[in-house]
Image (cartoon, grey):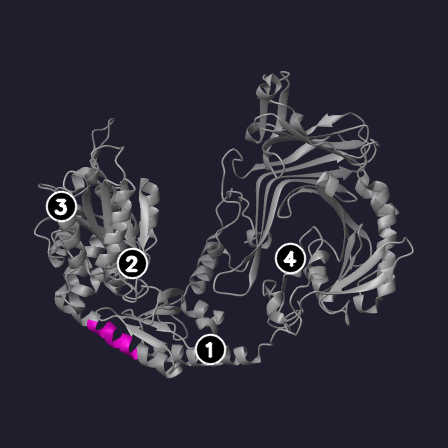
Amino acid sequence: MGDLDNGWTVSDSFPDHPLPAHDITARLNTARAETMRWDDPDQTRLGFAMSAPDPFATAVWSSFLAANTNNVGVHTGFGAGTSGTRRLEREALLSLAGLYRADAADGHLTSGATEAVIQGLRIGRNAVRDSSQDQVAVITSEFAHHSVAKAAEILGLRFIAAPVDSTWTLTVDALDRAVDQAVQEGATGILVVATAGYYNSGLCDPIAALTERMRERAVREAGRVRYFCHVDAAHGGFIYPFSDPELAFDFRNVGVHAMAVDPHKSGLLPYSCGVLLTRKGMLGHATAVSPVTGVVDDTLAGSRPGAAAAALWSVLFGYGRSRFTDVTHACMAKRDELAEAVQAADPDCHLRLAPAAPVVAVAFHVPEGRLPKELTERYRLVPVNAPTPDGGRRLYYHFYAGHSLTSEQIAGFRRHLTRAVADARSAAVTRPAPAAGSADTAAAREMVPPTVCFRHFVAHPPGQRDPDGPGYSFHTFVPRRSTGEQLRTRSWGTAPSGREVTLFAPDLEQPFSHEFLGISTDSYTAEFLDRHQQKLSLVGAVHFSVPLPDLGCHVLVNFESDGSFRSVEYKFGSDSATDEIQCFADRTVLKIGKDAAGVRRPHSDAYSFSVDTSLECDITWEEGDGSPRLTTQRLNSDPLLPRRRHLAREQYRRFPNRFFDTELTLRVGREHQEPWRLCELLSGPASISVPDDEHDGKEYSGALAWSARLGLCTVDAGVASGNLRVECESLPMGRRLSVTVPQDLGLQLSQALPSLDVGDPEKLNLDTAVGFAEAVYSVIACFLPDRSDGNRWHVDPHTRPSAAEGAR
């Protein structure tokens, strides 16, 4: 998967011809081998409500696949579901309605409980509002499954997550407070989602009490507020009827209107099979009639596989209440066995066993309550921050004892857990305490160059800094303050130029072998990376930065480890979001709207990196006089639409993330004499022309991008008289930013700058480093932006007055 190397996914070519059969088989076998087996004695999915499907169910499902039956529609109505898989769906659903104490019910199969929740709340929304102008709110607990919030977003409903107390459930008092808040803010319809089987605890909301209170309010507030209750029984629906038949979570409560169940969790079905059940009369609130065909559909998905209905029917009628009860009791026994294993591995942990579900929630007695990453990934464990009886909060991990969990797997988990707990406690004892005086000093903070380099704030832990060593990972960064290696500063003295020089580094005693050495003056900042950091760096081994605050930008020059020039970067914008021109000896790269971030991954001290750029245009300067030609024009995202600039924190795992709205690559001869412009080469959706009739009637053309300076803008570039000019025009028109650099700036600098081999940084000394930095600046100063010289870099940001401003 090449996209893992660069952090973004570029489309693959569709195969022109079929792969050989042996290649297909080999690749499928590889994928199958990479998939966790249910009987693997060394690991299992303890953290999720998953279990091996019943073999008979998978066989039935497979046997009906070739028929490719479509169970579109609802088959529980009068006269419906009379043959084939539609009859099997009707019989399966009505038997479930009996299991959940409904006198009469409607329903249909879904792809899972998420779809069932969306459909259930869609029905509820339509039932509680008189018109589309009515305000409807969804109320649930903070521990509810995220599908509830997803459904609220899809349906345009206000979402309220009521906080839980030490019961970890939605209490009547919490519901009352949330309803009062919603009604005071204008809600005329209230949808309450109660949970029967929380994923993180196996507990059940007091549904009888909740529905009773809602009905009391509905009577008291008749004509003003309407109430609807949906029960999310995705997990508990196939457990509670067999573990605790008297637990009243279902339709025996007259205030329950709809229910979602997941047979592919504890119902022994393969993925994906969910169920939505409603009271009679409720499905009419979701009825849609096709104006073209006249087909009536009360479902959300439309087409649905009949094979799923056949498989569900085979399990329900092949098991019956007695066999499901036996399976559930066996799971409860495995839960107790699992709890004993956890207690043996960590006698000081705090356990909470669900009284009617095979779920154990555990707060471990380890630093910060977190288990080591290797264990959590092996067993798919996810913690939740939950209230404790004493009023505090702790991290609790939850464990499911599915029917396919074996005693051998529990024993293996006990061994791994025992070792992980011991390792976590040992690491806490041996972790170095922060060194005395490690707090950032004002002087050290001032030394941070305007690039806001990530390594000033995070570092690889001691002992994990050699990329070629065992256990090394590019992303094993931790906050620098946790290592006790804050930046130190020291005066070096006065350089021959008269500039005062200050040194900064994590270790001034070993400045060239301990991450990096920094040199700072009032004119520039230079950094020399140690051997390990050089292997990590994507932009060279020496960085030289010149701030130009009067122009709102800074210049960054990078050198390779052998001392050769790598690139010069001209950056303008904020510290995190910049527009850039990067000049290499053989190419120039324009980056508009570049936003870089370091993101701490969830449940970890490790970091991932994210670079999000609105537009990147890579121009390669070839030998000869070849005309400019556009070789790549890739529109990955529409810049006209706002989007999340970076992934959600929880999405970062190991690999960095990079994204570009638009990618352009060009090739042009160095000796090409005719002027040219990027906008003349563009075509299709990457190009836009905007007439500015309000001012001078000029048409502004180019590629769309989000500039760090201008917001939404058009971007154009071109060469004339040996200079590359980049222009950004804001939309709507009114502001412009133009930057001019010599076309061969990178080539000029590669020939003019001094060279210093830093491949063996330990051999360097401070005087040599300072001398090199001074020599570099003396050259760079000749190439800095100068408004009076058209052959040098030129920045021309300005704002043209709008018509309204001109009238004033």
Select label 4 or label 3 by which is in front. 3
State which tag comes first along the sequence, 4 or 3: 3
Select label 1 or label 3 by which is in front. 3
> Which element carries disc 1, helix, strand or loop?
helix
Q: CA distance from mark 1 to mark 2?
A: 32 Å
Magenta-tinted stretch: 329-337
Q: Amino acid at mark 2?
A: Pro
The image shows residue 569 at horizontal and vertical percentages of 73, 45
Whether label 4 touches label 2, CB < 8 Å: no
> Which element carries disc 2, helix, strand or loop?
loop
Q: 623 above or below 448?
A: above
Select label 1 or label 4 by which is in front. 4
Residue 220, numbered label: 3
Q: Amino acid at mark 1?
A: Ala
The image shows residue 52 at horizontal and vertical percentages of 30, 65
Q: How many marks?
A: 4
Quarter of the image for the N terminus: give it.
bottom right
Residue 270, numbered label: 2
Residue 420, numbered label: 1
Residue placed under numbered mark 4 in the picture? 454
Q: CA distance from mark 1 to mark 4?
A: 31 Å
Q: 274 above or below 440?
A: above
Q: 656 above or below 517?
A: above
Q: Amino acid at mark 4?
A: Phe
